[in-house]
Amino acid sequence: MKYFRVEQEPASRYSGELNAAPRWGLPGVEPCPLCGLSGATLGLEYPCADLSSLPSKELARLSDPSPVSQGELERLRELVRPFVPANAVLDAGAELGPLTGTGSGTFGSLYMPAAWSLCLRREAMEALQKEGIRGLLGAPVSVKFRTQSPPSLMSLQMDVQGRFHPEALTWTRKPPCPRCGISDVEGPMPDPIVLESGSLPDGVDLFRLADAPGVIIATERFLESVNRLSLDGATFRAVEAR
């Protein structure tokens, strides 16, 4: 099986833009008193999570990105866990619920609001599912478009699986802090990307890397269907897996 990184088109012929953000999310975490690490993880998106049944006080907390203590983060993580898949990664910064905001312009079949986020037009998603593409899951964006014929965009929710090949790593990861559990990483993103084939999922054709959730990977099956259906709006760069 061949694999490809999904990337934004460097010079798209489409003018589409979304001024939108997920409705809720886990906030960042304050610096750990033991190791001093803090921050949030980029690329953990669960747009299918509907938290609207939670108390308004909790929804307000989940709408505020201000950093919280490790204990409060743990509490919020357990609060939202019933609304996400069992294997969801709920690190600080995980985004929950549909993209909400405004939009304008024209959109391709695929659209990346950011380098770590992917949307499909509804008709493109349905066509890919008919082609047998596995694991496609998404939620309609909650966006008001300034156009007479607005697109129906689906924000994709992808499994977080797969790792970089250890021999191709350009960073070192320290042992997790015994207090906060964060593992500090030193060094740049591997370039070129090389995947550890034994860590890659079998049942999905589109996923995020566990080592770097902002990296979206598609299988050869996915790319072949995209080409066969003449879908556009994103580019695919081959990555090695061994």
Image (spheres, rainbow, N blue to C red):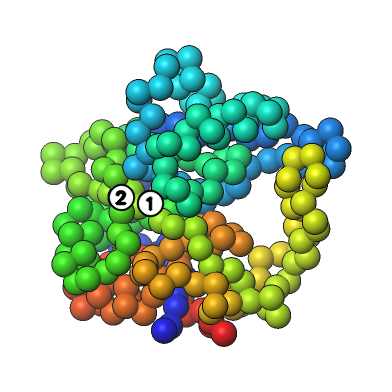
Q: Nearer the viewer, residue 47 or 115?
A: 47
Q: Nearer the viewer, residue 177 or 155?
A: 177
Residue in view at x 36 percent, y 79 percent: 220
146 vs 166: above or below: above
Determine whether the residue tagged by mark 2 lies in a helix, strand or loop.
Answer: strand
Percent x, y for residue 58? 49, 20
Percent x, y for residue 121? 23, 54
Indicate which disc residue 190 carries. Answer: none
Quarter of the image where the N terminus is located: bottom left
Q: Is residue 34 visible?
A: yes
Amino acid type at mark 1: Gln
Indicate which disc residue 138 carries. Answer: 2
139 vs 44, left or right, is left
Q: Earlier in the sequence, mark 1 or mark 2?
A: 2
Mark 2 and mark 1 in contact (Cβ < 8 Å)? yes
Residue where numbered disc 1 is placed: 157
Residue in view at x 71 percent, y 64 percent: 188
Q: Nearer the viewer, residue 73 or 43?
A: 73
Percent x, y for residue 48? 34, 42
Percent x, y for residue 214? 53, 56
